[in-house]
Image (spheres, coloured by chain):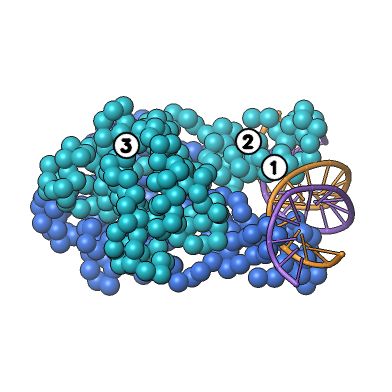
Chain colours: A blue, B cyan, C orange, D purple
DNA sequence: AAGTGGTCTAGACCACCAT
DNA sequence: TGGTGGTCTAGACCACTTC
């Protein structure tokens, strides 16, 4: 790739600006830099082999190429554990169930817990917009939430397929499934959404790339 | 937290240096910054609940608080698939098996594939150093490898516990286990290590925190 | 010896938040 | 209105690679 000096001359900006742009590219894993040698684009042959790679929050929230199906619209329920994890004052939470499909084939069911007011606004204003390739959280962030999403905390483990869910993702009861719990936080550090997912491991594997922060 | 101006006065360094230090802290998720308001430490109540959280490569390579046990020292085998994934010219790879314990209790077995010359040097020079809390890759990086590790590509899924491994992590054959494949790359973008792990899901869950890149 | 990226200082303007 | 972090310019020295 061009050197910092070349880009400085070409665009008439300071070296600091060039370096900052390169830092972003390195953080995204698109290029890597070697002191004394130069900047090189990452080998692309190792990318694009998976349904999805989620090394950043942006990737996690952009499920391109899949469709979402709402199994149950948001409804109020009592769930002390979920309410506690969302930091809610009472035991009431809003719950909805969704299923995600790739090329028409389902591979994950997710139960989503929200604060009552968030779930109600989702149901009243945004539910028709949910069908399609959006994510629930992306819709919420655009239409409902006061602060943008800043982070997510995930727990990934294996479990037996629950009988009541197994048919929804074409698993046999007792088969191993990939179990994922996620809590999303906004910039004010408040928990916004609790999502509990069951993945069919024959149709989905969780792919993740991590890189060292700075070159 | 102190403002940039305060730290500049206190330590007599430029603002750029202060900002760079803060950027590292933000990338590690230890603090967050709000324009116009200041810098704040992340709520620690949500950390430390898990055996380990691995949102960065550094965390993945530092298994603090656990011990490693070498089940089989590196030995040469033929494995076309593993050799191919490591980009090796022949089908010969060096294979070792390790088990990891937390407070004396095993929770994961890992088979590690290396290039022949790397495996041989590990066996000859560094094997005694492996016992203890180190990681294999950390040892390799310090003693054997020409380039530092720059990234990792992971695949996580669920599977039945293989009969020959289940007793090593106190699982029953046929129980669900967490299956993880990792390939580590160095700064020259060459694959260095292929690691295939089987986790006991009752003793370990893969915890992962992701944050938006820049505040 | 020339060129590369890594690091640092000094200084400026801006949008935003607090009061 | 003053302080915060976000962004930018200009310039310097360094270790390392390449020729």
Q: Earlier in the sequence, mark 2 or mark 3?
A: 2
Task: Give the residue pinned by disc 2.
Answer: B39
- Please name the residue shown 20% across and 53% down the image: B159
- N-terminal of the pair, mark 2 or mark 1, is 1
Is B125 or A106 nearer to us in this picture? B125
User: Mark on residue B69?
Assistant: 3
Q: Nearer the viewer, mark 2 or mark 3?
A: 3
Q: What SS does tag 3 mark?
A: strand
The percent coordinates of residue B43 (x first, y second) are: 49, 31
Q: Secondary structure at mark 1?
A: helix
Up the image or down, B102 lies above or below A174; here it is above
State the image coordinates of residue A70 (x, y, percent, origin top left). Answer: 26, 59
| Chain identity of mark 1 | B
Mark pair 1, 3: CA separation: 42 Å
* Residue D18 image point, x, y percent: 71, 68
Are dots 2 and 3 on a single chain?
yes
Say whether marks 2 and 3 touch (CB < 8 Å): no
Q: Nearer the viewer, mark 2 or mark 1?
A: 1
Q: Name the residue at 79% across, 60% down.
A: A14
Q: Secondary structure at mark 2?
A: strand
Disc on the earlier residue, 1 or 3: 1
Residue B171 appears anywhere in the view? no
Q: Are marks 2 and 1 on the same chain?
A: yes
**Is residue B8 visible from the viewing direction of this image?**
yes
Image disc number at residue A154:
none
- Find disc 1 in the rendering and name its residue: B19
């Amino acid at each position: 790739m061009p050197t910092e000096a070349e880009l400085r001359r070409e665009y008439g900006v300071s070296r600091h600006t060039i370096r900052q742009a390169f830092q972003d590219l390195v953080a995204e894993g698109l290029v890597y830099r070697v002191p004394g040698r130069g900047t090189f684009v990452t080998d692309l042959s190792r990318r694009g082999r998976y349904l999805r790679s989620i090394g950043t929050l942006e990737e996690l929230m952009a499920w391109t190429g899949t469709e979402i199906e709402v199994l149950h619209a948001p409804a109020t329920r009592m769930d002390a554990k979920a309410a506690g994890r969302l930091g809610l004052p009472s035991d009431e939470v809003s719950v909805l169930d969704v299923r995600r499909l790739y090329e028409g084939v389902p591979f994950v069911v997710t139960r989503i817990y929200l604060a009552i007011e968030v779930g109600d606004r989702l149901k009243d204003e945004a539910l028709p917009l949910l069908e399609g390739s959006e994510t629930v959280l992306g819709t919420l962030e655009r239409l409902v939430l006061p602060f943008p999403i800043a982070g997510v905390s995930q727990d990934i483990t294996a479990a037996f397929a629950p009988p009541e869910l197994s048919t929804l993702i074409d698993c046999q009861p007792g088969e191993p499934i990939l179990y994922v719990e996620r809590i999303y936080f906004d910039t004010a550090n408040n928990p916004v959404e609790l999502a509990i997912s069951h993945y069919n491991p024959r149709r989905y594997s969780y792919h993740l790339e991590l890189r060292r922060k700075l070159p």
